[in-house]
């Protein structure tokens, strides 16, 4: 009964969204206040209705109601509670329900916290947001109903894919969706501005927090996925340039560009039409990502559209929203007159370069991702585009970005002078080069990757540090330290996020360049040494987990007289009939020790892999810093208050005092 | 995630990527084999190199590649040998011939175009009409003379 009620609530939410699309839009056009005001309660009721539907589905998973097809297919009574809950979004239908819930939540936040928006703009934003919801409600109701019942309820379920039964991956999809869907807000603002024909500094200030929030969530989601791949897949890779990964990376890159260009709109009233275009593209890439992940068209070229109906549907949504908004853009972009003038050497110019590098790098990922499809369709060539292509074609853009970052972030607005920022930065450049040389001298091979990573990391982190230090102005060190603490959140956010980028660049380069690997057959009791470590396989035993059986190896690892024990596992999940490898990792600041146990060999002994992964955690540490920087910026008072202050005061009805 | 599920589902007895038994005694030759195999795609997986993949076919390809290297093939000859049998699908880095030129040149071309447009934007001095519109004048009038 509850299930049917939830289904009904979802249908009702779709109807509300249709009303919310039409009525406020007409109201805004005609200037009818009552019609515009309808958007707020509509947005709120959408959240209540979808929230109810989602809660019911979660409940069905928690109590293992196998009369619901989705629960039967993706759950099992033996599964730990955390994975029963994460099972809700561990499948197509449930994740789509989460998607519409987040869509409704974002729309409602604009209604709840958008009190300082002009009425017309708010009505239009909410109407556009609701129109996206309508498309996805239709998608979920017509093609992917999560509330389908089974005629006879089975005794137990089929279990969730064991690879997904992992804390890192349990929260990976919700964060990604918060990011993907968050970009719909920027899109709605962009389309509303196009309809309105007006983009000004205030618009830039309103759209930025939404983009920033979406970008932060995407950063966390991507980092979680990459971290999961690192410890779960058994050889410590962290990024594979897989189409599904690229699907989340493209919107991240565009959102990063949008974030920066919106600053230019806000502070300098320039790059307006470009910013609108980026907002459209960012959400377009989100939808494209959804298409890639859910249609199965690109995960394997040979299984074109695992589910053609769904794929075609998302393609239609993509074509409608991106195509429609681009037509609107072509008609209206001319009206977006930029008033800010800036010199060739200025912060604005640096941000233009930042945008070019980010946008083109995103395009590289895009073309590399879809090329196998194009090559097969138009040229009859069945080929692959893999990591070597992306490494070669994408890396230069990140290197370029890292090189200009410290310079650009310190240049003055409007008219800057390179020598003014160059002189204090020169010290960091020298230090970066010196440390790179040191790294080159210390390392064993001749590869330039590690030293280049060191140089770029030091340069970017140093630049970020210098940047925030210079914000404290002149005076004694203690005065400046005091001021440092009182700097606005946006300054801290900028410095922390930029430093995070430097840390990640360094981590990636260092790990790829200096990794040590040892693969061998080890007998129980056998000792061997890898680098500075003495490794002993002391025992291998079989054990039993809640819903799996496991072969667990015990390795004692000694370095400099200190011993620690690692216990890698090979698990087998009988319900899903699926094996997984569980690497054992000793996390360290300077290195991870990473051990994987393989099969028993025919001649006795076990295949054992031992890796030393230098600076591995710096990769995700940098991502955390980037996300943290975003949070600091979001927490900036100006982000919330000043937007209201810029609202025209002339509307007040009180008579000004003479 | 999906691809892994598929890969693992395909496996009867799962093994890890490069197996100890496959490793060549000559470390230099083994190093070459590892580098080449990182650029070759596992034919039945969704996006993994034969170096990472644990599918049986990848194991066979790794062994085949090592046999060619031991027989004295150069890197290029060994790769060509495998491509002739499995198609260019197994090359993770597509060659820069024919239509693939579009793939390789798209990014540099895009970058150049973007830099050109960007330069234009930076150099442009927009003719800004700073005078007030009629509506703004009227509003100003209202504010100044309440």
Image (cartoon, coloured by chain):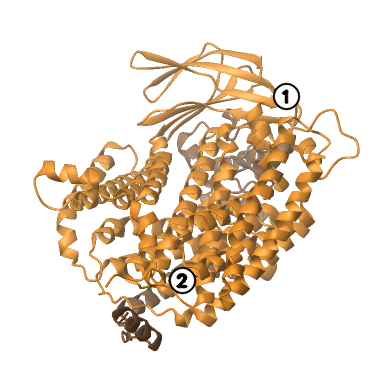
Image location of residue A489, percent across then percent down: 32, 49
The residue positioned 36% from the left and 71% from the top of the image is A655
Judge from the rendering whether residue B12 lies leftward or rightward of residue A374; answer left or right. right
Q: CA distance from mark 2 to mark 1?
A: 53 Å
Looking at the rendered structure, whether the residues under marks 2 and 1 are on a common chain is answered as: no
Tell me the tag on residue A78: 1
The picture places residue A555, in percent across and down from the top left corner, at 50, 17
Q: Nearer the viewer, residue A99 or A316?
A: A99
Is residue A548 or residue A634 the one in the foreground? Answer: A634
Residue indicated by mark 2: B110
The image quadrant that residue A535 belongs to is top left
Q: In the rendering, what colour is chain B?
A: brown
Label number found at residue A219: none
Shown in orange, the chain is: A
Q: Secondary structure at mark 2?
A: helix
The residue sitting at the bottom extreme is B134
Q: Which residue appears at 39% of the width and 61% of the height?
A: A644
Nearest the viewer among A59 and A142 is A59
Q: Nearer the viewer, mark 2 or mark 1?
A: 1
Residue A270 visible in the picture:
yes
Relative to A338, is B100 above or below? above
Mark 1: few/some/many CA within 10 Å (<14, 14-19, 20+): some
Picture quarter with the N terminus of chain A:
top right
Instruction: Classify 10 Å Cα crowding around label 2: few (below 14), some (14-19), many (20 and above).
Output: some
Toward the left, the furthest residue is: A476
Across and down, in percent, residue A206 comes to 43, 62
Image position, residue B125 (x, y; %)? 30, 82
């Amino acid at each position: 009964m509850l299930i049917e009620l939830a289904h009904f609530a979802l249908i009702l939410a779709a109807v509300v969204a249709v009303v919310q699309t039409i009525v406020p839009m007409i109201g805004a056009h005609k200037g009818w206040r009552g019609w515009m005001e309808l958007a707020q309660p509509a947005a709120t009721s959408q959240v209540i209705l979808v929230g109810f539907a989602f809660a019911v589905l979660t409940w069905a998973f928690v109590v293992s109601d196998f009369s619901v097809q989705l629960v039967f297919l993706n759950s099992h009574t033996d599964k730990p509670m955390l994975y029963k809950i994460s099972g809700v979004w561990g499948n197509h239908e449930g994740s789509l329900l989460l998607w519409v819930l987040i869509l409704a939540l974002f729309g409602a936040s604009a209604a709840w916290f958008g009190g300082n928006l002009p009425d017309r703009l708010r009505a239009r934003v909410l109407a556009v947001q609701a129109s996206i919801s309508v498309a996805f409600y239709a998608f979920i109701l017509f093609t992917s109903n999560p509330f389908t019942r089974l005629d006879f309820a089975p005794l137990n379920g089929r279990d969730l894919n064991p690879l997904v039964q992992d804390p890192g991956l349990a929260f990976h999809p919700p964060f990604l969706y918060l990011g993907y869907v968050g970009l719909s807000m920027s899109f709605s603002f962009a389309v509303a501005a196009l309809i309105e024909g007006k983009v000004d500094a205030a618009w830039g200030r309103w759209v930025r927090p939404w983009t920033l929030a979406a970008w932060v969530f995407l950063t966390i989601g991507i980092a979680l996925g990459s971290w999961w791949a690192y410890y779960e897949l058994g050889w410590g890779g962290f990024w594979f340039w897989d189409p599904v990964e690229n699907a989340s990376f493209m919107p991240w890159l565009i959102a990063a560009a949008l974030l920066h260009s919106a600053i230019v709109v806000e502070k300098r009233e320039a790059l307006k039409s470009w910013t609108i275009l980026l907002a459209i593209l960012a959400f377009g890439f989100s939808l494209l990502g959804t298409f890639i992940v859910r249609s199965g068209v690109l995960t394997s070229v040979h299984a074109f559209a695992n589910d053609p109906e769904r794929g075609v549907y998302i393609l239609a949504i993509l074509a409608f929203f991106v195509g429609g908004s681009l037509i609107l853009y072509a008609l209206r972009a001319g009206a977006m007159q930029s008033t800010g003038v800036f010199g060739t050497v200025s912060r604005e110019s640096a941000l233009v370069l930042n945008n070019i590098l980010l946008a083109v790098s995103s395009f590289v990922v895009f073309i590399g991702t879809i090329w196998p499809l194009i090559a097969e369709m138009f040229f009859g060539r069945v080929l692959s585009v893999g990591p070597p292509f992306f490494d070669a074609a994408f890396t230069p853009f990140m290197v370029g970005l890292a090189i200009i970052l410290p310079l650009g972030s310190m240049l003055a607005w409007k008219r800057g002078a390179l020598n003014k920022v160059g002189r204090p930065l020169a010290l960091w450049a020298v230090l970066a080069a010196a440390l790179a040389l040191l790294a080159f001298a210390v390392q064993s091979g001749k590869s330039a990757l590690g030293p280049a990573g060191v140089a770029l990391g030091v340069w970017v982190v140093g630049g970020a540090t210098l940047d925030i230090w210079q914000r404290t102005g002149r005076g004694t060190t203690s005065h400046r330290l005091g001021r440092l603490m009182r700097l606005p959140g946006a300054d801290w956010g900028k410095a922390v996020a930029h430093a995070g980028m430097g840390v990640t660049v360094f981590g990636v380069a260092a790990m790829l360049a200096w990794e040590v690997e040892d693969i061998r057959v080890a007998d129980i009791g056998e000792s061997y040494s890898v680098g500075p470590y003495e490794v002993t396989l002391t025992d291998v035993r079989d054990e039993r987990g809640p819903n799996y059986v496991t072969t667990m190896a015990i390795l004692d690892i000694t370095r400099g007289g200190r011993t620690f024990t690692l216990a890698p596992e090979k698990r087998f999940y009988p319900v899903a009939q699926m094996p997984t490898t569980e690497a054992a990792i000793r996390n360290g600041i300077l290195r991870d020790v990473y051990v994987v146990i393989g099969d028993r060999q025919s001649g006795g002994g076990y295949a054992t892999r031992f890796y030393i992964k230098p600076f591995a955690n710096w990769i995700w540490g940098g991502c955390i810093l980037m996300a943290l920087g975003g949070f600091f910026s979001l927490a900036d008072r100006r982000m919330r208050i000043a937007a209201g202050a810029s609202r025209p005061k002339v509307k007040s009805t009180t008579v000004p005092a003479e | 995630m999906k691809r892994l599920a598929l890969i693992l589902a395909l496996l009867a007895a799962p093994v890890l990527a490069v197996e100890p038994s496959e490793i060549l005694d000559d470390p230099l030759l083994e190093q070459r084999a590892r580098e080449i195999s990182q650029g070759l795609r596992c034919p039945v997986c969704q996006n993994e190199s034969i170096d990472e993949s644990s599918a049986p076919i990848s194991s066979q390809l790794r062994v085949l590649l090592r046999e060619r290297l031991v027989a004295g093939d150069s890197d290029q000859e060994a790769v060509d040998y495998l491509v002739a049998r499995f198609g260019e699908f197994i090359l993770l880095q597509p060659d820069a011939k024919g239509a693939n030129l579009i793939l390789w040149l798209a990014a540099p071309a895009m970058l150049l175009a973007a830099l050109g447009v960007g330069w234009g934007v930076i150099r442009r001095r927009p003719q800004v009409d700073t005078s007030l519109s009629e509506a703004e004048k009227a509003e100003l009038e209202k504010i100044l003379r309440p």
